[in-house]
Image: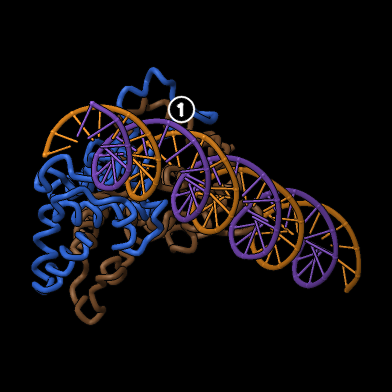
Chain colours: A blue, B brown, C purple, D orange
Amino acid sequence: MKMSGGVEWALHCCTLLSRASEPVPAAKLAEFHDVSPTYLAKQLQALSRAGLVRSTQGNSGGYTLTRDAARITVLDVVEAVDGALPAFRCTEVRQRGPLATPAQDCTAPCPIARVMDSADRAWRDSLRTVTIADLVADADRDLTPGTLRRAQEWLRA
Amino acid sequence: MKMSGGVEWALHCCTLLSRASEPVPAAKLAEFHDVSPTYLAKQLQALSRAGLVRSTQGNSGGYTLTRDAARITVLDVVEAVDGALPAFRCTEVRQRGPLATPAQDCTAPCPIARVMDSADRAWRDSLRTVTIADLVADADRDLTPGTLRRAQEWLRA
DNA sequence: GTAAAACTACTCGGATATTTTTTGTCCGAGTTTGAGTGG
DNA sequence: CCACTCAAACTCGGACAAAAAATATCCGAGTAGTTTTAC
């Protein structure tokens, strides 16, 4: 079980976008994080389809957050990039084999599925409690003031 | 993000093994659940390597739980089959790019990694609270008494 | 009759292909900006 | 001096390969029970 590596990139991009006031092109985001520009573009498209960012085309275009960073949770980004489907999908094994339980008797979900669903919910609940704004605040605490200023300058150039 | 499908099979096998007093061969487990025998064998080997089941060879051999079902958690099985590594792995993006943070300044983990680790811990904690014995108890509640008896008979034949 | 030895049938275990998913790349459609031109 | 036209550069978006991982499979090593055989 492995989460898409693009999730990490997407989260870093969201924190950066929350700091920038003007649109930031995908190429610039890729250069800043030193990752594959074309593949990062794919993740940004996913964010766009999910309605988390808005893309403006043409010269001096790029990506912008559609709403305040405090209203975007980490879960939003994870589900946008990695998909909203639960990691565990019950295949109804109990309805197969020589002693299969008839489908009509399977009114309640399989106990295994219940446990997995519960764990999945706990995981999602945990990710939902943190917003992009929280990530930025945490990062600022660990950063020297000069670094932040230089980042702002680099974005403009 | 998708969990290995073998996890579901392995959990079903563990519940069945907890009911059986004698060793059950892999072929029989596969037939009972109507799944690929050879691939199921792979999952059982993983359980064996993790020390959850013990294999006895030769005629009338098979797999047996190494300890009581109440002492085997769902998390044990998941980690045995799917691996114990967290779904999210921080690649230290902050240490790359034109404004990379020096490695010496990265004493604390990246905020994103912290959030992901916390969610992963919540997920694992949830899975750790349920044992194979709990699954069996839940399944028995939804099952008709006759079905259980027929399963016991089928196992012997 | 008994004990040892060989044989057979059945078990697991790891090395080996095939399919699916993830990762990574490319080129075309569309838009904004800016310069150039005529009124 | 202003407005309009045109062209160029830059943007994203979805369609297209390559690599990695999951899935499925096969055959060999080893063991327990059974039969056979010698004593």
- Return the x and y of residue A46 as percentages of the image width and height: 33, 41
Q: Residue at x 47, y 46 (%)?
A: B6
Q: Is residue A53 left or right of residue B77?
A: left
Q: Position of residue C27 (x, y in %)?
A: 52, 43
Tell which of B25 and A106 is nearer to you: A106
Q: Is residue B65 visible?
A: no
Determine which residue is flagged by label 1: A95
Q: Amino acid at mark 1?
A: Gln
Determine the image quadrant of residue C19.
top right
Say which residue appears at 24% left-offset and 70% top-offset.
B99
Which chain is disc 1 placed on?
A
x, y percentage for residue B90? 30, 64
Going 44% across and 63% down the picture, which residue do you hit? Answer: B51
State the count of labels. 1
Task: Say which quadrant the C terminus of chain B sits in.
Answer: top right
Q: Position of residue B100 (x, y in %)?
A: 26, 72
Does A145 sit above or below residue B62? below
| Relative depth, front residue between B122 and A132 | A132
Q: Residue furthest bottom?
A: B104
Q: How dense is the environment of label 1, judged by Cα within 10 Å: few (below 14), some, or many (20 and up)?
A: some
Locate residue D39 relative to residue B138 in the image: left or right: right
